[in-house]
Amino acid sequence: MRESLKAAAPIMGGYLVLGIPCGILGAQAGMSALQIGLMSLIFYSGAGQYLIANMVLAGVPVGSIIASVSLVNTRQLLYAAALAPYTQSDGKLAATAFAATVTDESFGVNLERYQSTTAAADVDAGASFATRWTIRNATLVNVFSWLTWCGANLIGVFVGEQLQVPSELAAFAMTAIFLCLLLCQPATRPAVVAALGAGVAMVICKWAGLNGPAIIVSALIGIAAAMGVRALDASRADPAATQPAVSEAVA
Amino acid sequence: MSWGTYWVVVGTCAATILASRVLPLLLLKGRQLPDWLSDALGFIPPATFAALVANDLLDPGMFDAGLWPGVIPWLAAIPVVVVALRTRSLLWCIVAGCAAYGLLLLIPSG
């Protein structure tokens, strides 16, 4: 519990400052406090909620709103896939509850915990069991973040106008989180290529006007580039092999 | 907003995001994954975090309001990088980034 709270604290801080303007925007888009509270509970997507409110304000038709928001949120497919190997020994129900409450930020934090405690466990098998990150730890991180998000949204609805948080400053808290998570990744050659490839692809997507699926498209291009490097490295290490050998670079 | 419209929009969006969040995990869970696939899954974090950072820092309209507003996030990112590499702490990265960003906002763009 305490471990999870500690891991969730930066996310909670970020959600507090970003959730308040989100609540204000929702109210401006004509949603009641109940509607905003329910949306942050059952939908729970910062990017999605901002997008819905902005599109409603702009008078975009319902069908286009749904298509755009769903497309933006397809990036969650990648998070779920990346987390799957860490939930092998967990029950279906626990895994579903955990997966259903993943966000960009909690994905990053939980994955980092999973990676670092697994690595530590590999080094010291004896003392490892108690310190390994569990699905309970991970789900608690999600729940703390979730409740903070809902609370911040409601603060925005009720007292938001008095709190003048510049929205671009609030949004930069998330940028700082992503930047830190990126820099904490192991800097293996294919991982660096994955990051650079995704960054370049994002520039191309944005300047081509492809905004909705830009994150998942860029990430997939980065992953493809990394797989290319991985295959190249493997064939160089063992020119006779037709199939790329096992790469132990990234767990 | 009318409850009818609300439920169509929020209900559908909640269903699609839930499917995106849960289905891949349930499909891959409990399977012996081939090496290439587990390596590919390992490249998801660097690729998505880089895409998210680039998404926040780059936009075709970033210099629409002048050079200075477009440069602020980049300048504020510098202390975040330093703090991230030194401390690996999310909390300190947020503090450093938002403090730098706030101070830069105080400087008039001229």
Image (cartoon, grey):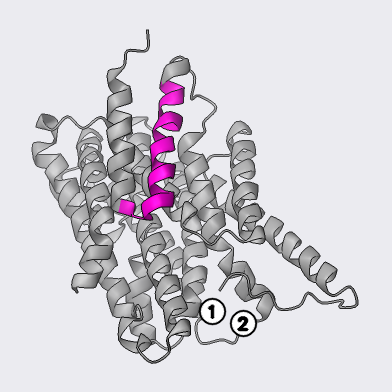
Tag 2: amino acid: Leu
Name the main secondary structure of what is drawn in magenta.
Answer: helix
Chain ID, mark 1: B
Which percent across, then down, holds residue B87? 36, 53
Which percent across, then down, holds residue B100? 32, 32
Q: Which residue is mark 2?
A: B33
Of residues A161 and B76, the one drawn nearer to the viewer in this rendering:
B76
Of residues B38 and A42, the one drawn nearer to the viewer in this rendering:
B38
Label 2 CA crowd tier, 10 Å (few <14, some 14–19, many 20+): few
Image marks 1 and 2: residues in contact by CB distance under 8 Å: yes
Going 23% across and 54% down the picture, which residue do you hit?
A: A12
Q: Earlier in the sequence, mark 1 or mark 2?
A: 1
Q: Residue furthest right?
A: A240
Instruction: Look at the picture and state if A82 lies above or below A95.
Output: above
Going 77% across and 66% down the picture, which residue do you hit?
A: A233
The label on residue B28 is 1
Instruction: Look at the picture and state if A181 lies above or below A211.
Output: below
Q: Residue furthest top?
A: B110
Instruction: Look at the picture and state if B18 lies above or below A52.
Output: below
Quadrant where the N terminus of chain A lies?
bottom left
Judge depth for marks 1 and 2 and give the one in front.
2
Of residues A191 and A43, the one drawn nearer to the viewer in this rendering:
A191
Instruction: Please provide the residue range marked out in magenta.
Output: B69-90
- Left or right: residue B22 compared with residue A20: right
B83 falls in the magenta region: yes
- Left or right: residue A92 compared with residue B102: right
Labels 1 and 2 positioned on one and the same chain: yes
Which percent across, then down, holds residue A201? 64, 44
